[in-house]
Image (spheres, rainbow, N blue to C red):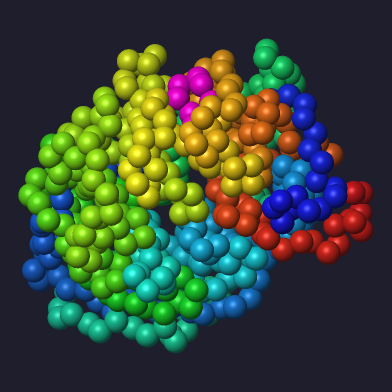
Amino acid sequence: MSQRGEVAVLSRRAVCASGIALPVVGAVAACSTDGGADERGAGAGAGGGTAGDGASLQPRTPPPVEVVGERAPLVAWDALRLPLEMTVMLVVDPGWTAPAQQLDGILVGYSEQDGGLQFQAVHEDGTILWRTTRPASCTGFALSRTRDGRACAVLMDDRAEGGRSEAAGSDGAGADGAGSDGAGADGAGSDGAGADAVGLHGGGADGGVTDGTAAAPAGPAPPNESDSPNESASSNGSDLSATAIELRTGEILWGPVPVPGPPVAPGLVFGPAGNTPGDQSVADPQAVVVLDPDSGEEAMLDAEGQRVLAEHQGSVLFIAGDRLVFAEAHDGSEHWAVSLPNGIDAETAHVAGAIHPDDDFLVVAGSDGGAADAGGDVPAGTLLNRSSGAVIAEQADAAAQDLAAEVTVVVSGRDVRGLDDAGEEVRHHEDVEPVTLLCAGERLAYAIRPQEGTLLVLDTLGGRMVQPFDLDVDAPMGIPELFTARAATVVRSQGRRFLVTTTLDENFGQREGS
């Protein structure tokens, strides 16, 4: 039983599907002015290229990392409407304005401040571990792991004219007043106007509830939700560098090292801005670089004509000929190699969605989408076991594992399936329209109905539509986006991100009005 499941008050109200209008957001490139790589996307080509295309531009000393060690600002229990299971936990505001990433129960995100970005690493218990700043254009970042098990965040930075500088140590102090600007106990999300924060009103035709305003289809969560990237950034990405920071301590592990552009696929895969999933024509394949998280050097991959799909915790997923290969970044030794899944074209294959660090799955898709596109004319992807390469399920647009229920949720068009550990279907839901999966955790799965502009919530144990939000709280709704293994949850409300921690609110039973 999960940590939250041990609290007696967590019985869930199973009513009907919840509906909520969501804002339209567009993917924006990191450190680039000419468009960005979709987070799902695989970069074109393999790591044969060099990262130092701008010969006169050498990495500068990265901004210092400030070690913090204090709890992020608390959010009042009635400032957000949350799923019932989350209402007994402390909620904090790290100030993040873009989707966060997590590894080993440490979450990293950024907020826009004073013309730049403030990155903060926050433990799932709500403690801010460290913070650092980057240029406003450098929104791209990735988490990975070294061979000795150290989790790290790799952040982007500009390069400056002149010789190479030594990396700064981790004992530098950040700028004064660099604390979170997020909402405290008297409010949450007050600076945003996103439609995803409206309350539940009215009844939907299928028994769900909507607020009466539908949003246009929402795509995968972008690295930055502003309308356009910072115009001061390079248009070709040749003046960028990357630096690795240990997640737990804030120590700089390596860098800065030059890279040819922002992340163009999951993990430490960098390429010229403009790369998009399955489109090799937009950039020279030899310009795409995969970094070894141990050293920041290029990954050792053995073959020409490869197409890199992702880097994940020190291993690289790539296509070589008609094979899909998963190999160590530092020496190229193979974990496994399998034939490309049926219906997946080598020229357009990409990893669909982020690769969750706490399960053992990934989805490889072809073309630029799945069965939800064009009424099913585009082949859906294939769900693979990351440890072996074995096919778990076909017809998969996206997947997420609910660790609490031990059920893997697979979406393909209108179909939402629940699979057990053996890949057998144990639950099935056919929705009124193709849906986009957000996340799964604590026995619930969350998805968007893009055409209707509403939120779909399913009970992963029974496959039923439910409405799990606390209806007694009159506040903006917090939509779950990410779960850690211990059920800390990042929720989005009005364009901002809040963290439902793993720390129990000791005053839960004494709240006024509760």
Query: Is residue 341 among the parts visible in the rendering?
Result: yes
In the drawing, does residue 94 fall left or right of residue 207?
Answer: left
The reply to whether the magenta stretch includes residue 154 is: no
Magenta range: 408-416
Image point (56%, 31%), residue name = 418
In the drawing, does residue 294 fall left or right of residue 461?
Answer: left
| Residue 404 location (% of width, % of height) | 64, 46
Q: Across the whole image, how many numbered discs are drawn on residues?
A: 0
| Residue 188 location (% of width, % of height) | 68, 52
Q: Who is closer to the viewer here, 459 or 247?
A: 459
Image point (55%, 35%), residue name = 420
Secondary structure of the magenta portion, mostly?
A: strand
Image point (22%, 82%), residue name = 165
Image point (45%, 42%), residue name = 221
Q: Relative to 402, is 142 above or below?
A: below
Q: Who is closer to the viewer here, 370 or 91?
A: 370
Which residue is outermost to the front? Answer: 422
